[in-house]
Image: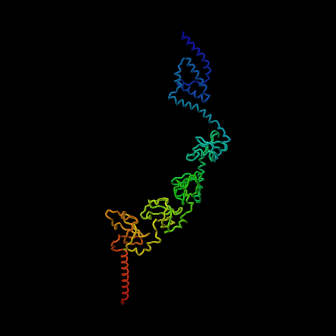
Amino acid sequence: MTETNDQALAQEATESNAPAEQELAPTPEPAPADETGTIEVEAASANEASDDSAPEEEQTEPKSEVAAAAGTEEEPAAEAVQPTVDEAPREAEADSEADAPEVEEEQGVAEPPLAPSAIPFAAALEAKNPVEGKVIGWNKGGFHIACDGVTTFCPRSLMELGNRPKPPSHYVNNTYAFHVLEIKEAGRRIVLTRRPAIRSERRQALDEIRARQESREPVTGKVTSVTEFGAFVDLGGGLGGLVHRTQISRTRNGEPADLVKVGQRVEALVTKVETKNGKRSARISLSMKALEADPWKETAKGFSAGDQFKGKVVRHCEFGFFVELAPGLDGLVHTSQLPIGKSMSHPAFAAGEEIEGWIVEVAPKRRRIALSLREVPASDPWKDLGKQYVEGAEVEGKVEQVSRFGIFVELEPGLTGLLPMSAVKLPEGGLARRTYPPGREIKVVIESIDRKRRRLGLAPPGSQLVGTKTDYKKYRQRQKDSSGLNVMAAAFAKLQQPK
């Protein structure tokens, strides 16, 4: 009885669905049974993109109702809807076919006209002309620029060359030259860039720098930073130059940080604009001291050899130390001109100390002044050696220094002789440096005099000199004179002979 009622209900449901199937008769024929699941999914996705797929979607709904009325299970239908791995390419191909009409429709639609406010920007973009804009705000991505009442946008990476923008506060409320990069959304979004304008400004500024270098005209700028090797100066137009520490001043000495300060405006000459691979670059060398008066032309004329000096020790070097005689005018005290018995490490020669001495030589062309802390003779002692300085004479002197090959003895200022170490007699176990300390007065004998090379050979007192160069020269002179007379006498005798 139950089975009969179920069959009757199924028959009534079939009859009630028959008109719906008749109404759907004009629709296209369904796809083959092996692709039913795939087609149903494609039809459903196509319905979202186009209204032309609506009949296919309506056709699938009655099938599901009939299947439910016939007692079919939902699980096989779900399996049919899920595409397999092999069917995935077919589904992608069907999606592309469904999207194709939409792309054609978009290409066929004409672009909307530019907003009137964007027309000047389009003209500037086509002509590559700059536009002027004021930075009115910023966000994480870039800056908002007001140009002729239109708000535009400039990315942060395009505000400077090299993708190194400064802090946003550096740009806000400032006006710059920009170039239009692109126009989007019918002119509702305009993107700008500063890079072409910066390159143009730098080219113009560099041309001006080169012109000033050729004409020897000074440039002005502001010191941006100071390091141990010099000061960096902003010259404008995105260009900067370096004033090396040796080019800061002629008249002042010290560290760069003591001579110039950050923010100070300075004037300098352009000495070099470096090039690389034949192209101009912005590496510029500057000199501030080139604008100062050269002290070697006028100030140095007030110093002469033999004069006394008074100055301040400014710096030490390997072979002595420099003394400032006048602003921009330094002289050198060589280690050999230190007082006898003192070295460079003596506290009296520390930097900043005032010292006195004598000028040995002034050479303006070589920009050198030789100084000495020993008394300098008023005249050259070698040009007029006294009678006491003859070979074989015993004299008294003062030890200057001891070397490995002998002892230097000063007989008077400007006159020093050498006592060979081979002639020195030392006590057993004694050292020459201890036996003959600098400043000790000793007696020596003059063994030889070489005026041409300005050398004096000394010997210990009491030495028996076998012969001297002076004796040898006298002997040679006597031989020359006697030989000359003999020749003349022979010639005269020959003339007297009868023919």
In-front residue for pair 349/62: 349
Q: Residue at x 47, y 63 (%)?
A: 333
Question: Residue 166: horizontal and vertical position, in percent?
Answer: 57, 46
Specify the farthest residue to the left: 428
Q: Please, is residue 16 above or below residue 442 in the view?
A: above
Judge left or right: residue 336 versus residue 3: left
Q: Please, is residue 418 above or below residue 184 in the view?
A: below
Q: Residue at x 37, y 85 (%)?
A: 489
Question: Residue 491: horizontal and vertical position, in percent?
Answer: 37, 85
Judge left or right: residue 134 versus residue 33: right
Q: If the image is split into quadrants, where does the C terminus sit?
A: bottom left
In-front residue for pair 69/124: 124
Judge left or right: residue 476 versus residue 100: left
Q: If the image is split into quadrants, where does the N terminus sit?
A: top right
In-front residue for pair 318/145: 318
Judge left or right: residue 359 versus residue 99: left
Say whether residue 139 is visible.
yes
Question: Residue 264: horizontal and vertical position, in percent?
Answer: 58, 54
Q: Please, is residue 167 above or below residue 86 in the view?
A: below
The scheme the figure's colours follow is rainbow
Specify the farthest residue to the top: 1
In-front residue for pair 453/303: 303
Residue 470's quadrant in the figure?
bottom left
Question: Residue 126: horizontal and vertical position, in percent?
Answer: 63, 45
